[in-house]
Amino acid sequence: MLRSSTLSYNDRKQDMASLFEEIVILLILIAIASVLRFWKLGEWSFWADEIFSVQDAQNFPESLTINPIIYAIIHWTTNTFGLNEWSARLGPCIIGIISLPFIYLIARRMFSAQVGVVSSLFLVFHPWHIYWSQNARAYSLVFFLAGISAYCFYEAIESNKLRYSILSLLLTMLSIASYLHCVLILPAFIIYVIILPFLPITLPKGLNKRILLTFFVPFILSLSVLFIPTVREYIYSGWGSNEWGRNALYILFTVGYSLGIPFTVASIIGIFHSFAYLNRGGIFLMCYAIVPLLCLLAISPFLNVAGYYLFFTMPAYLILAGLCASEAISFMARDSKVLSSAVVLILLIFLISQSYLYFFVENGGREKWKEAFQSISGKVEIDDTVVVPMPRVAEYYLQKQNLQQLEKVINSIEQSQNQWNENKQDVWFVIDEPSVQVLDPQHKFQDWLYTNCRLVKEFPVYARVMDRTVRIWYLDYIEPISETKQPNNNIEQSN
């Protein structure tokens, strides 16, 4: 008995040492994640969607929006700390940091402590997560809520515990209230429940009516509200028509690029490994990752969707990649300790290099709107017209109301030119390269711009495989420029 109790004590001591080691590692990862997500948080310029969130949040809750939770968070932080880039992004930043220990716990419960640590390590340096943690948008919030919701649904079926089903229901509702596109997580859960009985595996004890009805019945009942026209219009406002012409191939490639090709490959290997060993956790994560993607590809011809709408599925890819790396470590460790860490090192080097580009080369993946408007803030006269792709961005940074939308000007350039000429107005064009390429595919407006206007300054940014340069053009009708005159090539370029 004494020998047995001694062994038991040693086992407990070893377990405590192992747990302490995990906690120390996790705290170090949280510290690094905090530094990366707070770094330059207030330096990056707002981009258009952030401006919409910030401005709409100021009217919350009087003006109810399509995603109320994130607006409530931004409303509180900007009212508390003042209206600026740092305060608007503070909530998503903190939520992004908090997500790390939850990813660790989820991966640990589903697989092992090693998978939890590796998955958390990947999350710390992943530039896609850093980017959305530094955005005044809902994406870091839905990453957090959807990831925990998915785990609770999986745990409810595994353990047959009703509290997990109820918690998953509540978190899924919060996810959808945070970002409407999270409704696509429901088909993932449904497909998982459907395919389980067809697999040659032992069915989990929670695959029963009590667990499933508790979760799905509220959503089934809520479908009745779709018969109300105002509700349909409210929901459609969160999607919009496909005016940007994004097709299925574009969405597929942007998801792969945002995750990172090596990271995507590791996730796919994790899926194949799960099927090969009939691992229910891996199969569930496969449904969580793939089914929303397939749904988005199916609706892409009709609605305005983009690859980053699937950011809420990133926890699945993250843990699958962690599973792949962890299995590689275990397999290769038998032959070589150096080779055993090769997969982790390759993925880690890739993520760190992409994060380096994000901070030091790509300007945080954003256009330099703030710098552009600041450069002309003292030069724009009261009667001047400013043409911009998104007037609300100029309203925030330039505090000017005499604005015209670029799309309307492009569609009626002759009428606009006549009006400016009659009013003897000076016109400023502050436009970014992506907007011009989408709105002026035939280059007619660009030809007019080069012929009639003077390039004042440009703010070059090349990020996420796209030229995001912002250029400032000036049209002075007090002294009209001849159509045959060549544009001024003395371009001032920002650093």
Image (cartoon, rainbow, N blue to C red):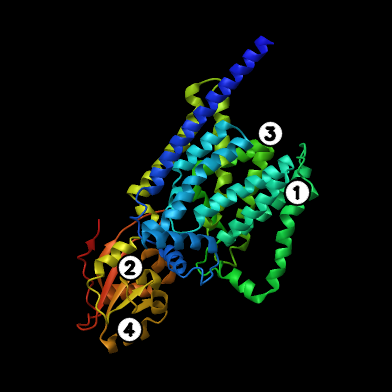
Mark 1, Cα crowd under 10 Å, few <14 / some 14-19 / many 20+, is many
Q: Earlier in the sequence, mark 1 or mark 3?
A: 1
Q: Say what secondary structure mark 3 lies in.
A: loop
- Give how far apart the Cα atoms at labels 2 and 1 are: 51 Å
Nearer to me, 156 or 314: 156
Does 444 sit above or below residue 207? Answer: below
- Amino acid at the residue labelled 2: Tyr
Q: Earlier in the sequence, mark 2 or mark 3?
A: 3
- Amino acid at the residue labelled 3: Tyr
Q: Residue at x 71, y 51 (%)?
A: 191
Q: Say what secondary structure mark 4 lies in.
A: helix
Q: Earlier in the sequence, mark 2 or mark 4?
A: 2
Q: Say what secondary structure mark 1 lies in.
A: helix
Q: Earlier in the sequence, mark 4 or mark 3?
A: 3
Tell me: 443 left or right of 425: right
The mark found on residue 277 in the picture is 3
- Viewer-nearest of discs 4 and 3: 3
Q: Which residue is mark 1?
A: 211
- Viewer-nearest of discs 1 and 3: 1
- Amino acid at the residue labelled 4: Gln
Q: Which residue is mark 2?
A: 397
Marker count (numbered): 4
Nearer to me, 446 or 76: 76
- Residue 410 percent across, percent down from the top left: 39, 77
- Give how far apart the Cα atoms at labels 1 and 3 are: 26 Å
- Amino acid at the residue labelled 1: Ile
Tag 2 near tag 4, CB within 8 Å? no
Q: Which residue is mark 4?
A: 417
* Residue 286 visible, this angle: no
